Image: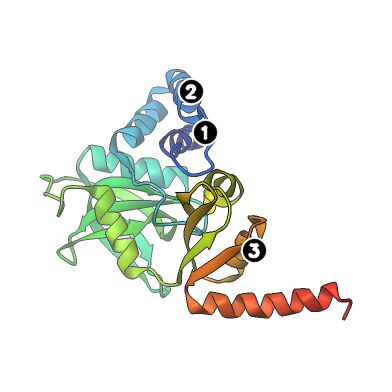
Amino acid sequence: EAVALAVGLQAAAQGAGAPGAVEGIAEASVRALAKVVQVMPARLRRRVQALGAVTVPAGWDTVGGAARETVDPEVLTTLALACRDTERVRFSYTAAGGEQTGRHVEPHRLVLLGRRWYLAGYDLDRQDWRSYRLDRLAAPNGTGVRFRARELPGGDAAAFVRAGVQSSRTGYDIEVIVEAPAAAVRERIGRWSSVAEIDAGRCRVRMTADMLEWPVMGLGMTGAEFQVISPPELIEWMRDWGARFSRAAAGK
């Protein structure tokens, strides 16, 4: 429970730049985290400090609409220690298609990208760098074997994970012009989307989604007129929903 609390505080501190984040959350989270860590037993303190040392926040711009996944704090801290101590790990991993395999990896960094945690590491069986979603990873165990750290391509763990997510992502890229000030739109749907000001009364909203139900509902929550730029499928959904809402309003 103590580790879970510390992980939550650290995530809040690192995600403070996210749209919709509470002002001052980073400073408050850092102060609270420092107090919690001070009173932890040495074993737990070591795990939490390792997590802080090897985690790279990667921002929110590419993951609007992604689901919030649950990650076991024990998985996080075990991998954090392995990253810090350059210790090879083995774990079970479930691919997007449901195939489960065993992995033997030299862990490099943990990356917090939007609402998901990832591990960037060198897969010894595949002889290549990979990124792994932690909600699909189970039973990580250190092997006791140390390794000489390899150079990550590009040198930036956040950029490496983000590129992998973008190349493998399925779903829809949503782009909409909303006839409302950016600040007002961020207040309503900024937590799940990227909002960029065009002028004082308009903004551009981008998000990604596996299904179109959420963008339809989210855009309705803005309370403003908007124009769909892409994808065309979203326009068809709008027509269908609009017709049904119109019939309901007419009592038919």
| Residue 69 in view, yes or no | no
Disc 2 secondary structure class: helix
The residue depicted at 48 percent of the width and 33 percent of the height is: 9
Mark 3 and mark 1 lie on one chain; the one further toward the N terminus is: 1
Say few, some or many: other residues with alpha carbon within 10 Å of mark 3 (under 14 / 14 to 19 / 20 or more).
Answer: few
Say few, some or many: other residues with alpha carbon within 10 Å of mark 2 (under 14 / 14 to 19 / 20 or more).
Answer: some
Along the viewing direction, whichever of 31 and 39 lies nearer the viewer: 31
Mark 2 and mark 1 lie on one chain; the one further toward the N terminus is: 1
Residue 161, percent across and down? 29, 55
The CA span between labels 3 and 1 is 32 Å
Determine whether, in the image, residue 152 is placed left or right of residue 2: left
Disc 3 secondary structure class: helix
Disc 2 to disc 1: CB gap under 8 Å: yes
Given the image, on which type of amino acid does mark 3 rest? Met
| Residue 241 in view, yes or no | yes
The residue depicted at 29 percent of the width and 33 percent of the height is: 53
Determine whether, in the image, residue 252 is placed left or right of residue 109: right
The residue where tag 2 is placed is: 36
Tally of numbered discs: 3
Given the image, on which type of amino acid does mark 1 rest? Leu
Please give the label number shown on residue 5: 1
Determine whether, in the image, residue 99 is placed left or right of residue 178: left
Residue 13, percent across and down? 44, 33
Against 11, residue 44 (above or below) is: above
Against 204, residue 211 (above or below) is: below
Of marks 3 and 1, the one in the foreground: 3
Residue 145, percent across and down? 17, 46
The residue where tag 3 is placed is: 217
Given the image, on which type of amino acid does mark 2 rest? Val
Disc 2 to disc 3: CB gap under 8 Å: no
The residue depicted at 19 percent of the width and 65 percent of the height is: 125
Residue 157, percent across and down? 24, 49
